[in-house]
Structures are given as C-alpha cells and as structure tokens.
Amino acid sequence: MRLTLLLVAASASLAASRVCKPHRTTTSLATVHQTSSAEAVPQSSSTETPLETPVVSSVYTPVVSLTTSSVPSSAATFVATPIRSSTVSQAVSEVASEVASEAATSVASEAATSVVSEVATSSASKAASSVVVSEVATSAASQAASSVATVASSAISSAASSAASSAATEVASGSFLFTGVSESGAEFGTGNIPGTEGTDYTFPNTSAIDILFDAGMNSFRVPFLMERMIPTEMTGTLDSDYFSGIETVVTHITGKGAYAILDPHNYGRYYSNIITDTDAFGSFWATLSAKFADNELVVFDTNNEYHDMENTLVAELNQAAITAIRGAGATSQYIFVEGNSYSGAWTWVSSGNGDALKDLTDPQDKIIYEMHQYLDSDGSGTSETCVSSTIGEERLEAATAWLRENGKTGVLGETGGADNSVCIAAVKGELQYLQDNSDVWAGFLWWAAGPWWADYMFSLEPSTGVAYESYLSVIETFLV
Ligand SMILES: *[C@@H]1O[C@H](CO)[C@@H](O)[C@H](O)[C@H]1NC(C)=O
C-alpha cells in the first residue's frame, strides 16, 4: 500500500480518501472534483491504455423482475412460513382422526429441528400424558386432540421465533442473502468537508437503483462521510440536510424490500485522525442507528476499510458499534463488521484480523464479517490488469476456511474487475466460488455504482457505466 502512504503525505485532509478505488475520470468528473476532492488524487492519467472492447456490447435487458414479495423482507419469513403451514396442516389432520398420541409424536417430529427440539420434546410429552389420562372417555379424545392442537400451536410459534433468530446467523443453503452494489456519491469530495451537495458530493440516483433492483439486486450499500453526518464531534447531533439525503435513499431502497447498508466510508478515521475514542464512536452509531431502529432492512456497516491501526483497536471499535446499535434499540438488523488492512479477504488471516475479530459478540447474533477483494497484483483495485483468471477464488480460500472453522458468516462487501477477458473470467470464478461456499458466504456487492463515476472502469451505473455493459450479465447469474 505504498500508494496509500504517498497520498496521505500529499494531503493533510485525506480522512476518507478512497485510495483503493480511484476513478478514471472523464472531463466532467474531473471538473467537478479536481480542485476540491481527495478522490481526484489517485486518478489515472489520460495516457492510460483505452479500455478494450466490451465483451457484452448489447444493451442489457432485464430478464429477472423481482417483486417486493420475492425479496426477503426478513429471514424469518422464509424460515417460519414452511414450518408453520406444514405443522398446522399435519396437526389438524391428526386431530380430525382423533389419534391424539400420533399427533403428539408427529408434532414432535415436525418440530424436531435443532432449534426447536427442546420445545418439541416437551410438547410431545405433555400431549402424550394428556392422552393417557383421558383415553377412556369418548369425549376425552377430542379434549386430547384439542390439547395437542394447543400444544402444537405453541410449539409452532416457538419454532418460528427460534428459527427466525437462528436464521440470523445462517445463510440459506445454496443461496445468497445479499447481492448488490455500493451506491457511491455521498462520500465523494473528501478534500472539502463538509462541502456542498452537487459540487463536492451527491446522493445516489434512486431511478438508477430501481434499474439495478429490477435486474435482480437486493442489497445496496450507501457510503457516506461521518464528518458530514455528525459534524465536529462524534458525540454531536445529526446534520439534518445530509441525514435527510441519506435517509431518502435508504427508505427508497428498503421500501422496495431490498437491504440498505449504511457505510461510514471513513477508514477508521474522523477528520483524518484514527478513531481511538471507542465511546464516542459508539455514540455516533447510537445516534444514527436509532433513526433506523424500526427498519429491519437497514444493515449497519461499522466502518469502511480500517487500515494501519492496531488490530485490537479495530476489534474494540467494532464491538463498541455493535453494543451501541443494540443499546439504541436497533435489535433486528444485521451488522457488518470490517477488519484492518482494508478488510482484505486475502489477508484476513495473515493480517491477524481473524484472531482479533473472532470474539466479537452480538446479543442478536447477527454479525456478518465483511471483507473486500480486488484482483489486481496489489489487491487495491486500481489496475485494469487482473493477476490471472483464477485469482478470485484463490484469494478467498484462506478466509473461507477461517469462516467455516470459526462458525462465522462472511459477505464480500466490495469486489470488481476491469473490462477484459482475464478479469471477467476471474470475477466469474470468484462469484462461483462464493456460491459454492454459500454455507459461509452470505453474498457479494460490486464496487460500485453511483452518478459521478463517469467512465471509471468498475462503474455499474445504468446504463452507460463500463461495468454495466460488460459485467451485469456476469453478475446477474449470481443474484439472489
Ligand atoms: C438517474 O438515473 C436515470 C435512470 O438511469 C437517468 O435517466 C437519469 O438521468 C439519472 N439522473 C441523474 C441526475 O444522474
């Protein structure tokens, strides 16, 4: 990350500069940002080799149209529904034939998943004793049946709620929970804080989000700057205009039934200084998360790409955020935690992130480990050259083993590749690998869409983004 150090030296106000994802700019983007934005620092020069002809050049036509009902409004819906309907219908049919003891056994068997086995066992024994006591009388059969029905109903509701909380830490087998893209814009212009909307930064385009949603995406990560959200000090109050801009985008996304991932794009820094006051950091998160406490489709991403800090500090900041979010009443949402070393998947174990972060705790048990992975030689996502067509899967192997060994769930929160055959093959291999290991990987998000990327090599902004043309058909195969 020598590039990082050079950039830090070049500017004293690089609090949240995006070193690892610079954009190749067009004239318009350069005009907007060159004088005010640290984002403009890592731009590629105009002498850069032109992009190759896109492999997929035809205009993309969405073939998958997700309706709100087909998007997970919550994991609980998926898990609870099949348990409820099958158990009820089974219980009813058993009751009708007055074979109460069989019904009890059946309820036990239906409910005998790992999460409800205790409930089921106790239900079965209660129902069975009820049957024995009353089996002499004709009317007793119907009483027993009704007793079974009552017990079954309580077992069902216990099963549903247990299953719902269990689902929080488990990825549905063979499929992803989160697939989508980062919606960049509000974090632009780090050289001018707070800066001016429309000049230094912009909010994501909800019409463009609709297009990506219609293409099958169900998760949109929304980067922003902590200094603009809560200025001056982390224990302060929300800036109403900036918050409102983010809130509009977030509620638009969740109103469609998709996940909105709140991403303070700050690299573990606030006004350029590494955050060491974990209480103040917790205060920031308490204030922000309280605003979304009732919206279960909001996901809290504690911070983007901690780096060049102590691993123990990164762990403490993540834990402070989790504790504060839950304490603020936001108890239903997933929390994405990130690691040091830019949260790289390929260095997750070797950097010590794995050891430092494996003991994070959440009373709701909804922690997801967010890692990032780029496929160029230094893993920074700044080159159009990918190492090889198999580098994607190779760079995920150690992290995947760590997730599995430690019973954790991960999400690839950023990835991308340029428009050339080696990168396209590498991205395909990477996403296929994630899908093949979806017992521990909950999904992936492309970096990035957003209205100001212009001809940035990874831009997924409809419909002119370079990656929108070359990669959407690749990504689409792996969408939930
Ligand atoms: C927002 O996205 C829509 C759909 O792609 C596009 O027509 C519109 O021009 C975009 N607006 C801005 C301000 O970028």
Image (cartoon, rainbow, N blue to C red):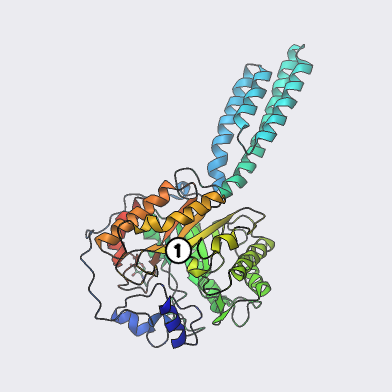
Find ligand 1 in the image and state its quadrant. Answer: bottom left
Label 1: how many Cα within 10 Å (few below 14, some 14–19, many 20+): many
SS at mark 1 in the image:
strand
Q: Nearer the viewer, residue 181 or 153?
A: 181
Asked if residue 46 is positioned above or below residue 256 in the image, the reply reads below
Residue 468 in picture, x, y percent from top left: 31, 62
Can residue 74 be seen in the rendering of this structure?
A: no
x and y, in percent, of residue 265 in the image: 50, 72
User: For the view shown, which residue lies furthest in the front direction?
Assistant: 350
Give the residue drawn at x 43%, y 60%: 445
Q: Is residue 88 above or below residue 328?
A: above
Question: For the view shown, which residue lies furthest in the right direction?
Answer: 133
Q: Is there any visible trace of residue 418 in the rendered image?
A: yes
Question: Picture quarter containing residue 280?
Answer: bottom right
Residue 145 lies in what quarter of the image? top right
Q: Is residue 457 left or right of residue 288?
A: left
Classify residue 175 as left or right of residue 90.
left
Viewer-side residue, 71 vs 6: 6
Within 8 Å: ligand 1 and the Cβ of disc 1? no
Along the line of sight, the residue nearer the viewer: 51 or 165: 51
| Badge count | 1
Give the residue type at disc 1: His
Q: Position of residue 269 (x, y in %)?
A: 55, 77
Instruction: Classify residue 128 by image quadrant.
Output: top right
When the figure is inspected, residue 453 is found, relative to residue 64, above or below; the finding is below
Quarter of the N terminus within the rendering: bottom left
Horizontal side of 266 relative to 101 (left or right) equals left
Query: What residue is shown at x 34% (from left), y 84% (from top)?
Result: 31
Residue placed under numbered mark 1 in the picture: 372
The percent position of residue 307, horizontal first and vertical second, equals: 51, 73
